[in-house]
Amino acid sequence: MLNLSRGELRLNSISILGTLGNLEVFLCAAALCVLILRKQWADYWALGTFLAVRITSDVVLTYLNKFGVHTFGLKIAYPIYFYVYWASSALESVVALLIVYSLFRLAMAPLKGLQTLGMLVFKWAAGISLLVALGNAFAPNLSGMRFIMNAISQLQRTQSILTLCLLLFVCFAVRPMGLSYSSRIFGVSLGLGAMATNDLVQSAWLAMNPKMETAYNTVNGVVICAILVIWTSYFALPEPKRRIIVLPTTSPFLRWNQISQALGDAPGFVAVGGVPPELFSPAELEVMRRASLKMATPISQAEERISISASRAV
């Protein structure tokens, strides 16, 4: 049996975390390179931005953790580390919402009506979620740093819940929208859903077991690396072509798409009240005058005045 002391266990955990951190940076760079080489930046720019932010924050935080105290001193290194960590966390949460937005747009591309309506609902839901997260962060006796930590933590939880709800719809719409489980839309959705689930579990776990932070950080590193491997694989492998969508007339997707398109159409306009003859061209006035002369019934006084005005205009 191996009998390791607490200090040795802690050193082993730190070594594992360091290895996972370096592996995460490598996998992020690999996924970003494959995405660009496959010429998918136009469709998955939000995912590329997320990976770039993750790489930058990991490199900066690793440098500050190893050399920050010797370079800047403890009083300067800690605030820099604090603000870089929480700022990158907030930025990743916002970009994750943009990834879901782009995935929904790509998945619903064949049904323009539902796409437009869903994107509008998504914008309102995301805006309300951000306001709720900031509102829940306010609490008495909170200093500046505590407020930042509380606000970003609330934002991460709200973003994770919203991400899971919207990705659930995307997963159910994969087959009806002509996609397969080998498509990149599903692969990115799968990884993002796993990341959101991991964040929610981590938040609940650390709230009940704060002393297990190092152990769960190891689990978190393994999960993140697995997600990056999934994304890299989906972009490296060829994507099957999207099937032609054939929906029955009773399909709710078809009905709601027709309703959404009808609601988005500009309404027609009609003229209400009297119309002065100056609005018509001479040719139109002549046509109306000749048509009124051929009428079998006597014209009214108003119609007679229009006919006389038309004759004068000609």
Image: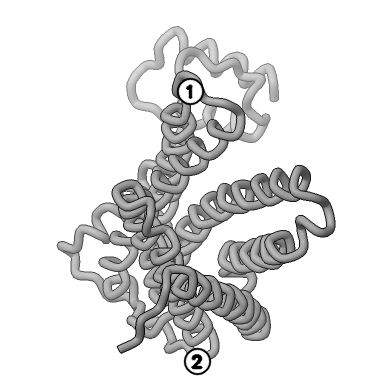
| Quadrant in the rendering for residue 201 | bottom left
- x 44%, y 35%: residue: 133
Name the secondary structure under disc 1: loop
Q: Nearer the viewer, residue 286 or 94?
A: 94
Asked if residue 203 is positioned above or below residue 215 in the image, the reply reads: above
- x 57%, y 47%: residue: 90
- Ranked by sequence position, the earlier of labels 1 and 2 is 2
Name the secondary structure under disc 2: loop
Asked if residue 157 is positioned above or below residue 186 in the image, the reply reads: above
Q: Nearer the viewer, residue 242 or 281?
A: 242
Q: Is residue 258 visible?
A: no
Q: Is residue 5 visible?
A: yes
Give yes or no for contact between labels 1 and 2 (Cβ–Cβ under 8 Å).
no
Residue lying farthest bottom?
238
- x 52%, y 29%: residue: 288
Q: Which mark is residue 144?
A: none
| Quadrant in the rendering for residue 135 | top left
Residue matched to label 1: 271
Judge from the rendering whether residue 35 lies leftward or rightward of residue 126; answer left or right: right
Q: Nearer the viewer, residue 314 or 120?
A: 120
Residue matched to label 2: 238
Give the percent coordinates (x, y) of residue 101.
48, 56
Give the percent coordinates (x, y) of residue 113.
39, 53
Q: Quadrant of the C terminus?
A: top right
* Within-10-Å neighbours for mark 2: few <14, some 14–19, many 20+: few
Q: Quadrant of the N terminus?
A: bottom left
Query: What amino acid type is highlighted by mark number 2?
Result: Pro
Judge from the rendering whether residue 100 lies leftward or rightward of residue 285; answer left or right: left
Give the percent coordinates (x, y) of residue 72.
83, 52
Q: Nearer the viewer, residue 65 or 144?
A: 65
Query: What amino acid type is highlighted by mark number 1?
Result: Ala
